[in-house]
Image (cartoon, rainbow, N blue to C red):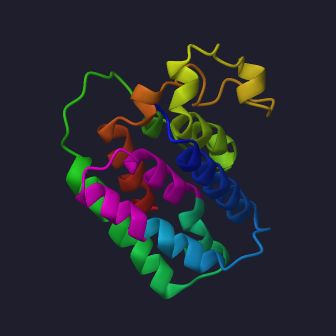
Amino acid sequence: MVNADAVTEWDALIGAWDEIRHGYYLGDAPARVRECARSLEASVAAAGPDTALWTLGLVLIGPYVIYAYPDAEAEAHVLKAMGAVEQALGQTPCAHDEHPCDDIEGDDELDNFRYVLDMLAHPEREAAGAAAPTDGELWPDDESDTWFERRMTREIWACPRNLAGFARAFTEA
């Protein structure tokens, strides 16, 4: 059974992260980024079930404190958390031929990341046998042939190798 309060909290966090990414968050964005980084570190250390959400959330909002509005303390937290992901998950074996992290080319491709986070935050949809949304519903941008297409599965996005790949790409950027 899915905890409705946890799902509501994830929805609020994902909304705030999307606002930070687009530059119209009204709260303390650097504090929100540091909070995400701390939560990610704790989740990685505990091998927590929400590591994928925290990792991909930080991929989405981490650039805010590195490039948009530099904040040295928040940047240090982000890089440390991403390093922990890469170190803990980078050598995990998996059976996937490819991962979404293999094809990411630029920041513009993160525009649809919110849909990935929504999918990960709502396991009840998959458990209830809800029909998968169409590409048009998932990807409102006209570029439906992007690196997201046909990879919208929880298994691939939450794969430890995928998370480590995103963390590695983030720290190398």
In the rendered view, tell whether residue 109 sits above or below residue 19. above
Direction from residue 117 to residue 52 in the image, left or right? left
Q: Main secondary structure of the magenta part?
A: helix
In the rendered view, tell whether residue 151 sits above or below residue 16. above
Viewer can see residue 106: no
Which residue is drawn at the image coordinates 39% and 54% (left, top)? Answer: 167
x then y, percent, for residue 147: 57, 31
Instruction: State the residue in front, 79 or 30.
Output: 30
Which residue is drawn at the image coordinates 50% and 59% (left, top)? Answer: 58
x then y, percent, for residue 14: 63, 53
Magenta-colored stretch includes residue 1: no
In the rendered view, tell whether residue 145 sits above or below residue 25. above
x then y, percent, for residue 103: 49, 36
Viewer can see residue 96: yes
Instruction: State the residue in front, 130 or 80.
Output: 130
Magenta-highlighted residues: 38-60
Instruction: State the residue in front, 42 or 149.
Output: 42
Instruction: State the residue in front, 113 or 9.
Output: 9
x then y, percent, for residue 75: 47, 77
Which residue is drawn at the image coordinates 63% and 16% (left, top)? Answer: 132
Magenta-colored stretch includes residue 44: yes
In the rendered view, tell whether residue 32 sits above or below residue 163. below
Which residue is drawn at the image coordinates 41% and 76% (left, top)? Answer: 77
Direction from residue 98 to residue 57 in the image, left or right? right
